[in-house]
Amino acid sequence: MKYPKVREIREAVRVVFAGPYTSAFPAAPHTPPAAFRGQPVFDAEACLGCLACEAVCPAGAIAHEDVLEGDRGPRRIMIHYTDTCIFCGECEAHCIAGGRGIRLTNAWDLACFERRTARESIEKPLACCECCGAAIATWDHLRWLASRLGELTYASPTLYLAQLRELGLVDAYPGGPTKEGWRPDRFKILCARCRRETALDHDTRAGRSSP
């Protein structure tokens, strides 16, 4: 028969009087340390919907869906799949809103019965091209860009019109190219493709070769 060592007896006696090394979870909530990296969570107010977090996520746990139609208007749905996330913190580290748009939390007890519920999402109003209707960026992202560029904002009609729209100084254009030619179209909120086309000769835009 192999007898326990003195160290093992000492550890056993200690556990009897001091309790187990592990926490009492699930009988009592577990409090992780302050530096614990738990589930990242979107902040609906601070998030710009710029997709930087989606671009850097190594696990592909962040995605988006642009909804261009509906009663609530165009909007971008930012989605975080908590069952795929590896809690690496890259999303927070590369968030252009100073790491406030999506932040790591101490949340770790994420068990669920249905995998389709292992997700969180927020919605951001989306700016669309006033010629072709394509998604450009969220309004919050355009305002952030304008704030960063300062007076250089006026080099981009899309950015300064977004600013004027927020101030209520301009109305939304009904949509679609104008019939008078390219010049009126240059003073609209446009996607990159339509912005390029408005800089070309209107004959080229109409499908005719310029002399």
Image (cartoon, rainbow, N blue to C red):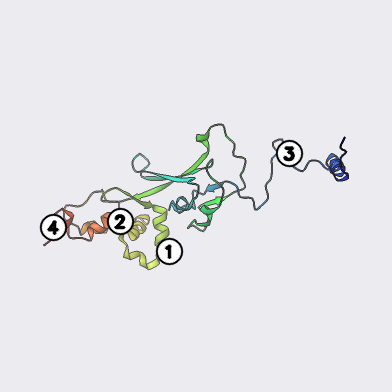
Instruction: Find the distance from the CA under tag 4 to the CA under tag 1.
Output: 40 Å
Secondary structure at numbered mark 3: loop
Tag 2–tag 1 contact (CB < 8 Å): no
Q: Is residue 206 left or right of residue 37?
A: left
Residue at image point 46% right, 50% down: 54
Q: Is residue 153 above or below residue 7?
A: below
Instruction: Give amino acid for label 4.
Output: Ser
Front: mark 4 or 1: 4
Residue at image point 71% right, 35% down: 27
Secondary structure at numbered mark 1: helix
Residue 148: give its label: 1
The part of the image, by quadrant, that contains residue 185 is bottom left
Around disc 1, counting alpha carbons within 10 Å, would you say few (fewer than 14), some (14 to 19), or many (20 or more)?
few
Tag 3–tag 2 contact (CB < 8 Å): no
**Residue 87 appears at what percent x and percent y?**
57, 48
Instruction: Find the distance from the CA under tag 3 to the CA under tag 1.
Output: 49 Å
**Residue 40 appears at what percent x and percent y?**
55, 48
Q: Is residue 204 left or right of residue 47?
A: left
**Residue 180 appears at what percent x and percent y?**
16, 55
Instruction: Find the distance from the CA under tag 4 to the CA under tag 2.
Output: 22 Å
| Tag 2 residue | 192
In this view of the protein, can residue 210 be seen by the observer?
Answer: yes
Tag 4–tag 2 contact (CB < 8 Å): no
| Tag 4 residue | 209
Q: Residue furthest bottom?
A: 151
Q: Earlier in the sequence, mark 3 or mark 2?
A: 3
